[in-house]
Image: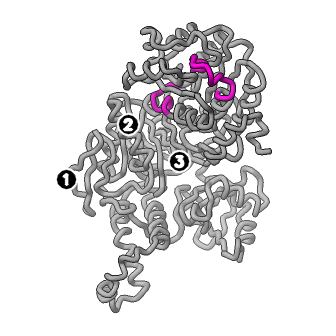
Amino acid sequence: MTKFEALGLQKSLLDAITDMGFETPSDVQEKAIPILLGEDTDLVALAQTGTGKTAAFGFPLIQKIDPNSRTTQGLILSPTRELCLQITKEMQAYSKYERNVNVVAIYGGASITDQARQIKRGAQIVVATPGRMKDMMSRGLVDITKIDYCVLDEADEMLNMGFFEDIKEILSDTPKDKNTWLFSATMPREVATIAKKFMNSPQEITVGTKNSGASTVQHEYYVVGGRDRYPALKRLADTNPDIFSVIFCRTKRDTQKVAENLIEDGYNAGALHGDLSQNQRDLVMNAFRKKQIQMLVATDVAARGIDVDDVTHVINYQLPDEIETYTHRSGRTGRAGKTGTSMVIVTRSELRKIKAIENKINQKFLSKKVPTGMEICEIQLHHLANKIKETEVNPEVESYLPAINEIFEGVEREELIKKMVSVEFTRFFDYYNKTRDINSGADRGDRADRSNTKPGEIPTSGSVRYFINVGEKDDHDWMSLKDFLRDTLELGQDDIFKVDVKESFSFFNTDAAITPKILATFKDFKVDGRFVNVEISSNPGGGGGRRNRSGGRRDGGGGRRRERSSSSKGGYGGDGGRRRSGSNSGSRGGNRDSNSSGSKSKRRGGFF
């Protein structure tokens, strides 16, 4: 018996699950499905975004409706058009082996006549945004007076978007004896009010701790001056060459401006905010899902409904006003069993907000330094060398090799490697060589990292940063590498911290007292026949960096301009592979090619 079969699901659903490649239920699925299948009950389920909530209510709903009746029996309300379409698509996949089950999406920005026609043909399950549902109800185009089940998905987001009155009006038109299933990441006052008014003695399940952040997300903050937010943003992106991120700003204006600045500086960025038309929004989101846009700068409202599982980083260019909003932001990464990182750029005056968020999400933030220019150069150089090593040789190049070999005749191997990486490295080095340290110095006790230990000496106090020659290419992320180090060294949960995993190498910190044990353990240490080396890093600031102060450039992008300053009201973006000059990434400003000297060349058309 499979784990899904043990939950009580029927064969047609199990066949669909097999087709989709699901093997093990998520925590919320394991808790919710047996309850919803076993009895007619109301349910409040608290779980983070990206934990598999759609399947948790979708499978039981499909199994419990009557496919032989064309009456609408199930209503699912979701906050945004994107999430509405996503849920509909998933429900249709779940019910692929169910005869006569029809799932219809109704949302704004599309023909209301076409949607009404689909409903009239018979839709047992309707997935809707509150605004369009209320509109169709007022026109008599949809009948929800006989539904048996109502699902409120992302309830806190819907209420935070101002749908409180709409939801109350919609629920008032549904039968009192229906079952209501409410799924939410947090439980603010408005959600509790809905539960009290429209639910009957609901059962409650919680995945993790109530209102807590996901355990798969590492939370970090960087303290800078207000005018250094944008330079800090770029450095964080450059430190993570394969970043694929959502960057949050408070306002539409900030979002647009930051996206335009990033595009002008050679990043594949795009803006997502309320001033975009639905067509523009669709273009941006499609590009983001295809990773043509790797740094999506968004407002909180516009980002709701983004359902992309591979986001590596969430960057809070500015903190939100409400702590619950931070929980939703960070929930965009670390989804579907993967790990992620939530970064916050703050000023000294905002540090008190970090403590308030920690108390709310029951997780600690890591205080980290914005990497120095030389640390970034080294990380980029390692990234470039590894990319060259892993590149598959195109057989078509063979015919050109005689002429190429003639050009390189007389050049020694070591000299050729230096020249090859210098093509990329010089641009980064020229840009970052004389840039200043933009950290403000508020480190919550991390000053001990900056010890005066001389090269070759083993530190005796404070925190020590190490370099290790394993990374993402060895199937490690920050969580698995931390577990590997802790198990190998037989250390406690909190003895390993500030773990930064790059493509082919990583960094981590411990207290100085553990240093002799670490160096002794990893002397001639092998894993699967390969030496794993650990060394004390000469750059203890937390951003990375090993011994040699050399670096690399972006993957194929144009050169760098002066590092732009931004006001404290900025935006942010991120993702890897981004800097192809001439990529069409979305923002009004379009993209610009850059040359190595940083001069601006012709503007290329963007999405809008």
**Comes first in the chain, label 2 or label 3:** 2
Q: Which residue is mark 2?
A: 282
Q: Amino acid at mark 2?
A: Asp
Q: Earlier in the sequence, mark 1 or mark 2?
A: 2
Which comes sooner in the sequence, label 3 or label 1?
3
Residue found at the very far bottom of the displayed protein: 410
Residue drawn 43% across the image and 18% down it: 116
Considering only vertical position in the picture, is 545 above or below 404? above
Tell me if label 3 and label 1 are in contact, CB under 8 Å: no
Classify the position of the N terminus by image quarter: top right
Q: Is residue 366 above or below residue 136?
A: below
Which kind of residue does numbered mark 1 sit on?
A: Lys
> Which residues make up the magenta segment?
62-85
Q: Nearer the viewer, mark 3 or mark 1?
A: 3
Label 1 neighbourhood size at 10 Å, few (<14), some (14-19), many (20+)? few
Q: Please indicate, yes or no, whether residue 422 appears anywhere in the rendered image.
A: yes
| Callout 2 secondary element | helix
Q: Secondary structure at mark 3?
A: loop
From the viewer's perspective, tell me whether residue 379 is left or right of residue 565. Answer: right
State the image coordinates of residue 62 (x, y, percent, origin top left). Answer: 64, 28
The colour scheme of the drawn protein is one colour
- The answer to whether marks 1 and 2 mark residues whose Cβ atoms lie closer than 8 Å is no
Residue behind mark 1? 602
Distance from the alpha carbon under mark 2 to that under mark 3: 19 Å
Look at the numbered disc 1 and give the secondary structure of its residue.
strand
* Viewer-nearest residue: 4 or 504: 4
Marks 1, 2: nearer the viewer: 2
**Residue 84 falls within the magenta-colored stretch:** yes
Tell me residue 317's x, y (percent).
Answer: 45, 39
The residue wearing badge 3 is 310
| 215 relative to 437, above or below | above
Residue 503 is one of the magenta-drawn residues? no
